[in-house]
Amino acid sequence: MSKNRTKKIIDYIQEKNVRSTKTLLKKSNLFECSKITIRRELHKLEAMGYLKLKYGSIDILTYEKYNSDKVYDLFDFDKHYETISSEAIELIDEDDSLFVTSGKTMHYFVKKINKPISLLLTNSVEIAFAAINNGYIKKTIIFGGIINKEKRSTYGPMLEDHINEINVDKLFMSCDHYDSDYIYCNDIYESFIIKKMIENAAKKFMLVDYTKVNSRGTIKTCSKDIFEAIITNSI
C-alpha cells in the first residue's frame, strides 16, 4: 500500500469532513486507485484505530493517531508481506505444483518464491505476471474466463471446468476476512473459484495480513480447519 495514497485519503477525509464511504468512493480518480482499493484502505485504517466504519458512515476517532510512529510504521506493508511470505516459502517443496489466488499478499509471495516450482496456476493476471518474471517458476498457467476488471482476475464456467481437471500439490490463498471459525470472500465468484481449488489441492495454506483477522465477511468460503497452516502477522 502506498504511504502517499494513504496520507492523501486521510487528509481528504479530515479536510473535507467526509463522513460517508459513498462520497469517498466517488473520488477514486483523485487517489488514482480503484474503489476496491479505497475500501481496503479504509478497513486497514479502521484496524489501526484511526476511524470506525458503520453502515456506510465514517466516524473519525482521532487524527493524532495517524502521526504516531507506531501507526506510520504500519503503513509499510511491504514489511508485513515480507514476514508472511518468508514463512510461506518455507512450506514449499522443490518442484511443487501450486494453485495461487489473487491479492496483494499473494502477489508479494509469488515474487519472493526462491525454490524451483514445476507449475503455478492462477486466475489472477497480476499473479501470472509475477510468476513469469520469477525464474524459479518453470511453467505458469492462467485460467481463461470472464475478466473482472477491478480485481484483474478471471471467473466463469470455462475456468471452473479447467480447475476440475487439475490436481496440485498445494494451494496458497488469501481472503477478505477471517474469524475464529471461517474464511470469507467479498466476491461470490472468487469464493466459488477458491472452493474449486480447495477440492483439487492436496494441501492448503492461508496467507492473511492482520487487517483481515477477527472480522466477519459477507460470503462464507470455507472452514479454517481445512488448512495445514494459517500464516499471519501481528501489529
Image (spheres, grey):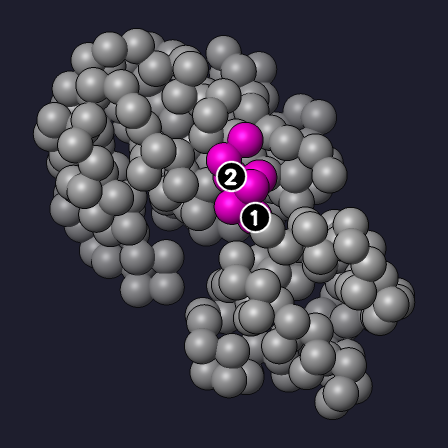
In this picture, residue 180 sits left or right of residue 30: right
Q: Tell me how far mark 1 sits from mark 2, CA to CA.
A: 6 Å
Q: Is residue 20 above or below residue 160?
A: below
Magenta highlight: main SS: helix
In this picture, residue 26 sits left or right of residue 9: left
Query: Which residue is pictured at 46% across the width and 25% down the height?
Result: 86
Q: Is residue 118 above or below residue 105?
A: above
In this picture, residue 63 sits left or right of residue 5: right
At which x and y percent is residue 144? 15, 46
Residues under numbered marks 1 and 2 in contact, where contact means CB atoms less than 8 Å apart:
yes
Residue that badge 2 annotates: 81
Residue that badge 1 annotates: 77
Residue 32 seen anywhere in this rendered image of the structure: yes
Q: Nearer the viewer, residue 80 or 69?
A: 69
At mark 1, the secondary structure is helix
Could you tell me how many numbered marks the image carries?
2
Residue 185 seen anywhere in this rendered image of the structure: no
Q: Is residue 209 above or below residue 137?
A: below
